[in-house]
Image: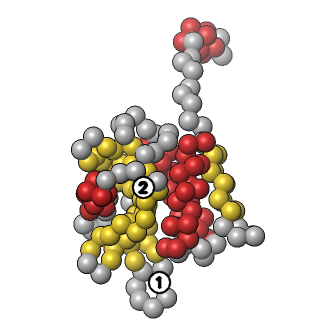
Amino acid sequence: MKPLSLCLVQMGDKGLELVSSHPKVLPKEVLTEITYKSMPMGAKPGEFVSSSVSDLFYSSYIFSLPREDSRDNICAIIAIFSDMKYNIDGIRKVFSFLIKELETKTLLKLDLMEEILPNLYTGFSKGNIRIKISSVATISIDFETKEEEPKDETTDLEDDLWK
């Protein structure tokens, strides 16, 4: 479940803007198109969107970024893939868990999100994510990326019959 790139997008003064991407492997034009499509009009925090741009596929999780001086800002974290065969539900769960954990620890800040993108990217490749945020805050997520072995249906039927 290794993405091509992870991106962070926010609502800026002039509309949606790309804050950061890791690694920087995609052309600017593609990132611009994904930026504009990653957060549909009227999107609300907690929503999850999946779609495609050209031959790339992406999933974005929309969240609210607290601000002290004005109203909260709306942002999205995006995973971009070269193939449609990725675990969409797994991406949603990882992004949702990450944002909720950062909110719980009152650490949900734009600069911190930018800082953890490389660790998050590496974690998707390895199948487990461990992000040390401070001396007292660490976020760990373990997930399986291997497919389940097909079950022997005859054994299952036999078990069901003799219950």
**Secondary structure under the numbered disc 2 in the rendered image:** loop
> Which residue occupies the foreground of this view, 152 or 147?
147
Q: Secondary structure at mark 1?
A: loop
Instruction: Return the mark for residue 145.
Output: none
Counting labels gives 2
Q: Amino acid at mark 1?
A: Arg
User: Horizontal and vertical percent for residue 25?
Assistant: 40, 50
- At x 59%, y 48%, the residue is 123
View extreme (right): residue:
135
Residue matched to label 1: 67
**Few, some or many residues within 10 Å of mark 2 (<14, 14–19, 20+):** few
Eyeballing the image, is 7 above or below 163? below
Residue 20 screen position, x and y as percent: 43, 65
Residue drawn where x is 31% and y is 53% of the image: 27
Query: Can residue 3 be seen?
Result: yes
User: Relative to residue 115, is residue 132 drawn left or right?
Assistant: right
Tell me if 79 is positioned left or right of 125 in this view. Answer: left
Q: Kindly identify the amino acid type of the residue bearing the numbered disc 2.
A: Lys
Number of other residues with Cα within 10 Å of mark 1, as a class: few under 14, some 14 to 19, many 20 or more: few
Residue 65, image x, y percentages: 46, 75
Identify the residue at the far bottom of this view.
69
- Can you give x and y, in whole percent of width and height, for residue 86 in the image? 43, 38
Name above or below for residue 42 compared with residue 124. below
- Say which of marks 2 and 1 sits in front: 2
Q: CA distance from mark 2 to mark 1?
A: 28 Å
- 9, above or below 5, in the image: below
Residue drawn at point x = 49 percent, y = 88 percent: 68
Label 2–label 1 contact, CB within 8 A: no
Q: Which residue is mark 2?
A: 24
Q: Does residue 6 show up?
A: no
Quadrant in which the C terminus appears: top right
Vertical position of residue 123 compared to residue 45: above or below: above
